Image (tube, rainbow, N blue to C red):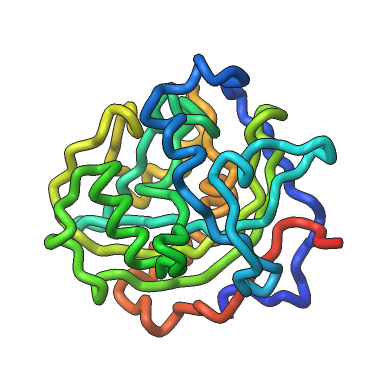
Amino acid sequence: MLWNTSNVDRKFVCINAAMKRFTEPRDIADVQAASLDKDMCLLVDENDNIVGAASKRDCHRVGANGRVPLHRAFSVLMFNSAGELLVQKRAAQKVTYPNAFTNTCCSHPLLINGVPEDVTTAAIRRLNQELGIPEQQLNREDFTFISRFIYEDPGDGVWGEYELDHVLILKSDAPVKPNPNEIDDVKYIPRNKMDSFIETLEDPVTPWFKLIHHHMLSYWWDNLHRLDEIAEPELIQSFVNIE
C-alpha cells in the first residue's frame, strides 16, 4: 500500500501561499470570469459520491464560515520519455492561486448536459485548453489513475479550495503550446532537481501540489515503470479533519 491510513496524521493542513488577491470582478480576465458561472463542478461527499453540482464560482468563493463546498477535481502529472515532470506557473489572472507553480494540469470534471464528465475525458479536454496538446494525441490508455486525496485550503480568504482530487499520471512526449490565459510558464524538471526546484522558488506553490510533492511524488516517480502495480484508485487519503 502506498498509504497506511491507520498511521495517517489527520490534522487540518492549511497552506497559505503568498498570493495576489482578486476580490473584484474587474480583477479577473474575461475568459476566467465567464467560466466561473458557466462551468458546473461536481459536488461530492467524502467517499467521492456525487451529491449535486454547483458553479465554479460557488465552489471556490469562500463562505461566511470560511469554507467552500467539497467538489471533485483532478491533477495530471505528465512525464516525458526522459522521466522529467512538466510543471506550470499559473497565469496572473487565474482566480485561485495566481502566479503559483503547480503540476502539469489541474482542473475539474464538469456536469455537461446533465451528465457528469469522467475524469480522464476532463483531463484530455483541459490539457488541450491549457497546454495546447491536440486531443487526438492523448490516448486514454496512456493515463494511469494513481490515487485520490482530499485537501482544504482557505486560499486568500476570498477564493479557496476544498477538493477531492483524482491524480492521473500521463507518460507522453506531446509538444505543448501553453495558453497565456491559463499559464505563464512551463518547465520540465528531472527527478534529482525537483526538491531543490521547490525549495528555491520565489513564487508560491499550490497547496495540492505541495501535498503531492511532500507525500506521494517521489514514490510514484521512482515507479513509473510499474504504475499499474502501485496504482490505488480505490484509496481516498484525507489531509483534513472531516467533521
Which residue shows up at 65% across the image and 60% down it? 150
Furthest residue toward top? 26
Quarter placement of the N terminus: bottom right
Which residue shows up at 45% across the image and 78% down it? 231
Query: On the picture, is 175 further left or further right than 18?
Result: left
Q: Closer to the camera, 36 or 85?
A: 36
The number of discs equals: 0
Query: On the picture, is 184 further left or further right than 60?
Result: left
Q: Position of residue 199 (x, y in %)?
A: 52, 34
Q: Position of residue 157 (x, y in %)?
A: 72, 29
206 in relation to 217, above or below: above
213 in relation to 17, above or below: below
Q: Closer to the camera, 152 or 198?
A: 152
Q: Position of residue 119 (x, y in %)?
A: 41, 66
71 in relation to 26, above or below: below
Q: Closer to the camera, 38 or 110?
A: 38
Which residue shows up at 66% across the image and 54% down it? 151
Q: Position of residue 156 (x, y in %)?
A: 67, 28
Res 178 quadrant in image: top left
Quarter placement of the C terminus: bottom right
Which residue shows up at 35% across the image and 48% down it? 104
Is residue 215 visible in this depiction of the protein? no
Furthest residue toward front? 113
Is residue 77 visible in this depiction of the protein? yes
